[in-house]
Image (cartoon, helix red, strand yellow):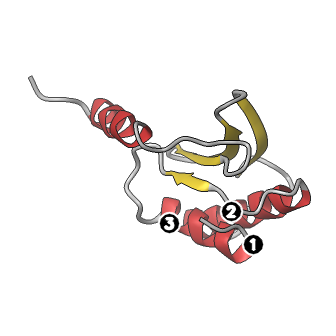
Amino acid sequence: MALSKVQKREKIKRRVRRNIFGTSVKPRLSVYRSNKEIYAQIIDDNSGLTLVSASSREKEVSSEGTKSDVSTSVGKALASKAIAKGIETVVFDRNGFVYHGRIKALAEGAREGGLKF
């Protein structure tokens, strides 16, 4: 039986998450993309806490331009919040999505904002 698009992504996500783990020293930057919005959060997997989050639904994030432009601004907003909390290095978790388009734009925006991964 063929897998649906969501099932394929979940399978890839499980495979990737076997190797990616966020600690308090180097937390995990997890990204979720829906058709309209994009969400990102920095997670400490040891304590199970979300340390910082940003999304395209926030008022501080500019909603001008294409979805890729919005993703870049979400990455920059997340990076500025993280640096304010003292987080400089993270592990990038693309959450089963292809590293292309909006996911790549968010990662590059976070790098421009000062995060290292």
Mark 3 residue crowding within 10 angstroms, few (<14) / some (14–19) / many (20+): some
Mark 2 is on which residue type? Gly
Which circle's residue, 1 or 2, is located before the other in the chain? 2
Mark 3 is on which residue type? Lys
Which circle's residue, 2 or 3, is located before the other in the chain? 2
Find numbered disc 3 in the image and state the secondary structure of the residue it sits on.
helix
Residue name at image x 67 percent, y 47 percent: 27
> Which numbered mark, 3 or 1, is in the foreground of this view?
1
Find numbered disc 1 in the image and state the secondary structure of the residue it sits on.
helix
Q: Which residue is mark 3?
A: 104
Q: Which residue is mark 2?
A: 75
Q: Which residue is mark 1?
A: 113
Find numbered disc 2 in the image and state the secondary structure of the residue it sits on.
helix
Pick the residue in front: 5 or 96.
96
Q: Could you say where residue 95 lies in the image, as x and y percent from the top left?
A: 47, 43
Label 2 near label 1: C-beta < 8 Å?
Answer: yes
Pick the residue in front: 58 or 93.
93
| Residue 102 in view here | yes
Residue name at image x 68 percent, y 40 percent: 43
Q: Is residue 6 left or right of residue 58?
A: left
Label 3 near label 2: C-beta < 8 Å?
Answer: no
Residue extending farthest to the right is 84
Q: Is residue 50 left or right of residue 15?
A: right
- Above or below residue 44? Residue 2 is above
Residue extending farthest to the bottom is 112
Q: Could you say where residue 68 lies in the image, as x and y percent from the top left?
A: 56, 67
Quadrant where the image shows the C terminus: bottom right
Residue name at image x 42 percent, y 43 percent: 19
Q: Could you say where residue 8 lies in the image, as x and y percent from the top left?
A: 27, 36
Mark 1 residue crowding within 10 angstroms, few (<14) / some (14–19) / many (20+): many
Pick the residue in front: 35 or 51.
51
Q: Could you say where residue 14 lies in the image, as x and y percent from the top left?
A: 37, 33
